[in-house]
Structures are given as structure tokens and as C-alpha cells.
Image (cartoon, rainbow, N blue to C red):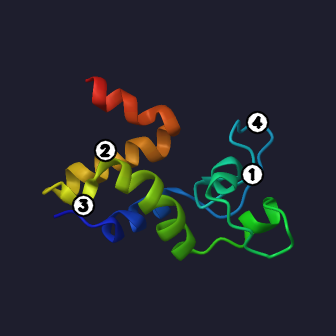
Amino acid sequence: MANVRKLLPFILSWEGGYVNDPVDKGGATNMGVTIATWRKVGYDKDGDGDIDVDDLKLLSKDDVLNRVLKPHYWDRWKADQIKSQSVANILVDWVWGSGANGIKIPQNS
């Protein structure tokens, strides 16, 4: 069966560190995680009482894997039940790169 830990290095190979490009609609992003996504996760990493770019800057690979990728992307596809790692990677990476509504496109195909 597919394993999320095998997908993470691929995703991180395309995603850089912290950026806040004014022309990027996603706003502040770290390792592919937008500030909006991190706020949905709801984890005040620096413990200062709010969830902001300071928390986003502190993300670790473990945070990306266990607080974002697995619960919000991998598990939504029930990708642990997919026999082919390649198929699981394609589907989950598609949603990762397409945003919250990305899951609908493969389902409708």
C-alpha cells in the first residue's frame, strides 16, 4: 500500500522555504503551505496567541507531513488504501498543487 512518507520528499523537492511574493495569490508560503492553510490547521507554533506568518516561518518538515499533508490531503483520498504508490502520489500531489477544490477534478474525470 502507498505511504505518505514516500510522497513528502517529492513535494518538498518542488516547494521551497518561506516566501511572500506579492504576485502569488496564496500569499505567504513555506514548503508549499500557505498562511491560509496553516490558519485552518490552527497551530500557534510560536505560542504568542495568534497564527500568523511568524508561525509559518517556523514550519518543519514534520509539521508539513503530520499537520498538513497527511490529515488534509493524503487522508482525504484514503491514499493509504491505494495499492500503487505512483497513483497515490499523482492524485495527492494534484490536490496539493491545485488547492482545496482540486479534489473535485479527478473525481469528475
Q: Quadrant of the C terminus?
A: top left
Task: Give the mark nearer the N terminus: 1 vs 4.
Answer: 4
C-alpha separation, residue under disc 2 versus residue under disc 4: 27 Å
Question: Disc 2, disc 1: CB below 8 Å?
Answer: no
C-alpha separation, residue under disc 1 versus residue under disc 4: 11 Å
Identify the residue shown where x is 39% and y is 42%.
94
Task: Give the mark nearer the N terminus: 2 vs 4.
Answer: 4
Task: Give the mark nearer the N terminus: 3 vs 2.
Answer: 3
Identify the residue shown where x is 81% and y is 66%.
54
C-alpha separation, residue under disc 2 versus residue under disc 1: 25 Å
Question: Disc 2, disc 4: CB below 8 Å?
Answer: no
The residue beneath circle 3 is 80
Task: Give the mark nearer the N terminus: 4 vs 3.
Answer: 4
Q: Amino acid at mark 2?
A: Leu
C-alpha separation, residue under disc 1 versus residue under disc 3: 30 Å
x, y percentage for residue 56? 72, 63
C-alpha separation, residue under disc 3 versus residue under disc 2: 12 Å
Mark 3 crowdedness (10 Å alpha carbons): few <14, some 14-19, many ≥20: some
Q: Tag on residue 23?
A: 4
Secondary structure at numbered mark 1? loop
Q: Is residue 13 left or right of residue 80?
A: right
The residue beneath circle 1 is 28
Mark 4 crowdedness (10 Å alpha carbons): few <14, some 14-19, many ≥20: few
The residue beneath circle 2 is 91
Secondary structure at numbered mark 3? helix
Instruction: Tell us which disc is closer to us: 3 or 2.
Output: 3
C-alpha separation, residue under disc 4 versus residue under disc 3: 36 Å
